[in-house]
Image (cartoon, rainbow, N blue to C red):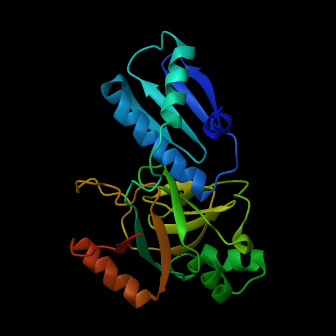
Amino acid sequence: MSKKDIRFQYIRYSENTILVKGLTTIDDFLHKELLFYKNKIENHYNKVIVEVILSFNWLLVIYVSAIENFYSEVLQLKSLARKGGKLDDHENRLWKIPVCYSSKLTPELTYFAEMKSLSVEEIIKAHTTPLYTVFFIGFLPGFVYLGGLNKELVTPRKSTPSPKIEKGTVAIGGSQTGVYPCDSPGGWYGIGKTPVNFFDVTVSKPCFVSPGDKIQFISIDECVYNDISILINSKVYQPESSIL
């Protein structure tokens, strides 16, 4: 039995879906393995499946029609998992995202600092130091779930979600951080704001980041925030990026 057989559990989720569930805590290696597995399933099945949805430590394989023989299908999926190949076949990018950590733009920042017994400067340093991994995109179109948050900033989600968190708010919930791509109710604490659009239906790729990419937040002041906002509205700004 291969390590992948042990690592994954195959569950009949509905009449036309199979849940491939990871048995270990999420980490960068497992995430790369899941991305590679997802690509192999999509390439092998082609039009037989509708979609393969990625989460932190599972894949949901959605078939066009009802699965006639679940056990036979699982054997096929396991055989794909055992096939060789490189985990880094997919080309990922590092994106540098400008963020204004200002209580004027994000009033919740002051409350968050008091709650964590940290200064705003300490929060900025702790939040901008890591390179975050884009594990998956969900909840809202373009909402990126990022792994790698500094333990000092880990905070339980709000007991009562806020009725409106503004587009561009960079927020923390639990051990995750992310960016709200549009105005939305939400239970995460806002600590900053970016002018960058994480979801734009007017372009060919509405969400420019992909699972497996890395994000680094770059602290900017309000003047730079306003300047970038003007460039974005004029469609002449692209976040800085490089191939990993």
Q: Is residue 139 above or below residue 233?
A: above
Write the residue at 48% across / 41% down: 37
Would residue 134 be visible to someone looking at this image?
A: yes
* Image quarter of the N terminus: top right
Q: Residue 244 location in percent, x, y?
A: 42, 69
Taking the image as shown, residue 11 lies to the left or right of residue 63, namely: right
Taking the image as shown, residue 48 lies to the left or right of residue 121, namely: left
Q: Is residue 68 above or below residue 142?
A: above
Number of numbered discs:
0
Write the residue at 51% across / 29% down: 79
Write the residue at 43% across / 59% down: 181
Would residue 138 be visible to someone looking at this image?
A: no
State which quadrant residue 238 falls in: bottom left
Q: Residue 156 location in percent, x, y?
A: 74, 60
Q: Residue 183 location in percent, x, y?
A: 45, 58
- Which residue sits furthest top? 68
Q: Residue 196 location in percent, x, y?
A: 37, 70
Q: Nearer the viewer, residue 195 or 214?
A: 214
Q: Nearer the viewer, residue 34 or 85?
A: 85
State which quadrant residue 9 falls in: top right
Q: Is residue 154 above or below residue 192?
A: above
